Image (spheres, helix red, strand yellow):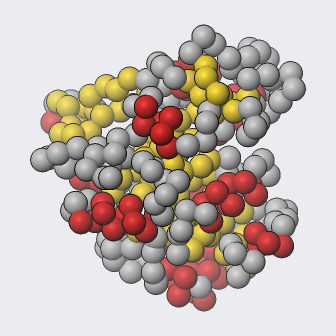
Amino acid sequence: MNFSSLDVFLDTGQTLLAKGPIALIFIEDLVEVDSTLTHHLGLGFAAVIALAPPELTLPADIAQKVHRIDYPLRHPDAMVSAMNQIIAACPPQTWLYYCYNGEYLFYPFSETRNIREVLAFHTEERRSAMLTYVVDLYAADLQVNPNGVNLQEAMIDRAGYYALARPDPANDNHPKERQLDFFGGLRWRFEEHVPEKKRKIDRISLFRTQPGLQFHANHTFSDEEYNTYACPWHHNLTAAVASFRAAKALKANAGSTFDVQSFYWYNSTPFEWNSAQLMNLGLMEPGQWF
């Protein structure tokens, strides 16, 4: 089903929001759109919705499975605005997921468990949101892949990740309870080319809607409990979003493209496209999930 604008979708397509989990894929450019949509279609979402520029053409087999909204992301606030409008339109307690093209969701044992099973378990743990780490993927050879993207030879950093306490400005900058800012990957290694506000690699990519919930540009929510990495009594399930987004940006930006001759370093390792590697590297937590 296609919608000519977000307004049209909100007026006529709300039946698609009646049952989750729903994946919202924000299409920034035309790089690896098909692979992103195919990956998320395979995870078992009730609906996959692509918010895409009008010039995007999808293969017929993907187009018939994806609901498309013509929604170019030219304005800096476009993504945040769309998220908040869709959150407000959803029934309460609907699970939503969001990412961009060139990004791929993994969760513990995602090869044998679908997203509905994961979120049913997470709901039973009395959690309404799930922390995800955005793990940078990149091409090893930028001479061959000048945009930094290569699925067949994707690389990942196996070290260099760390967390800092998240200060609370409303409480004399004391650390917020069960909240951390996470860093690493290309945003850390090439931080001189990344604005400070965009260096974090944590997102709350999976969450349940509720009345009045607001999504913020820094990938946090107005409900502080949503921004926590675990509940007070034990570790919870976390997930990872394997992402070419930072690599694309560093090579597309005129201020960094000539300074970045290679993303490869001694801690680079081939990405194996499975959840076991991400768990072994400590990039997601199975918690009580089994």
Residue 81, visible in the rendered structure: no
User: Number of callouts in the render?
Assistant: 0
Of the pair 287 and 129, the residue shown nearer to us: 287
Residue furthest left as drawn: 233
Q: Residue 246 lies in what quarter of the image?
A: top right
Q: x and y percent of residue 257 in the render?
A: 77, 23
Q: x and y percent of residue 143 in the render?
A: 86, 21
Residue 245, visible in the rendered structure: yes
Q: x and y percent of residue 75 in the render?
A: 65, 53
Q: x and y percent of residue 50 in the render?
A: 66, 66
The residue located at (61%, 41%) in the rendering is 273
The residue located at (56%, 15%) in the rendering is 267
Q: Residue 285 lies in what quarter of the image?
A: top left
The residue located at (62%, 70%) in the rendering is 49
Q: Residue 157 lies in what quarter of the image?
A: top right
Give above or below for 145 relative to 72. Answer: above
Name the image quarter holding the N terminus: bottom right
Of the pair 42 and 93, the residue shown nearer to us: 42
